[in-house]
Image (cartoon, rainbow, N blue to C red):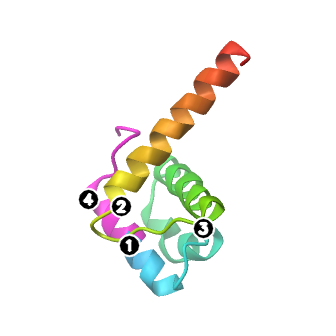
Amino acid sequence: MNKEMLSETVVSWLLWGVRQAGTYDPDKVLGFIEENLTLEEYKQIEGFLRWITKTGQTFGHLTLEEKFTEYSRGVKCEQARSDTGV
C-alpha cells in the first residue's frame, strides 16, 4: 500500500469510525474499526489520528486524502532527520 494514500475501503471505515465515535481520538475510533484493518493499516490510521488530534486539525470526506498526504510527508521528513541525526 502506498504510504501517502489510503484505499477506498480504509477511507470508508475511517470516516465511519469517526462518525460513530464522534471524535478523532484514535483510542475511540479504532475501537469501532480495528477488526476491519490489517496491522499496517491500523498503525497508519493510529498515527494519522494521533497527529490530527495533536495538531488540532479535523477532516471530512473531501479533505481526508489531503490531510493524510500532509501527515505522511511529515512522517517521512521526521524519519529522514532521524536517519541523518539532524
Left/right placement of residue 59 relative to residue 78 reads left
Disc 1 marks which amino acid?
Answer: Leu
Image quadrant occupied by the N terminus = top left
Give yes or no for contact between labels 1 and 3 (Cβ–Cβ under 8 Å).
no
In the figure, 76 relative to 67: above or below? above
Direction right: furthest residue: 85
Q: Which residue lies under the disc numbered 3? A: 26
> What distance separates the C-alpha of mark 2 from that of mark 4?
11 Å
* Frontmost residue, 27 versus 71: 71
Q: Is residue 50 magenta?
A: no
Q: Residue at x 50, y 56 (%)?
A: 45
Callout 3 crowding tier (Cα within 10 Å): few <14, some 14–19, many ≥20: many
Q: Which residue sits at x=55%, y=69%? A: 30
The mark that comes first in sequence, 2 or 4, is 4
Q: CA distance from mark 3 to mark 4?
A: 19 Å
The disc placed on residue 64 is: 2
- Secondary structure under tag 1 reads helix
Horizontal and vertical percent for residue 18? 46, 77
The magenta span reads 1-14
- Between the residue at mark 2 and the residue at mark 1, the CA separation in whole angstroms equals 9 Å
Q: Nearer the viewer, residue 22 or 12?
A: 22
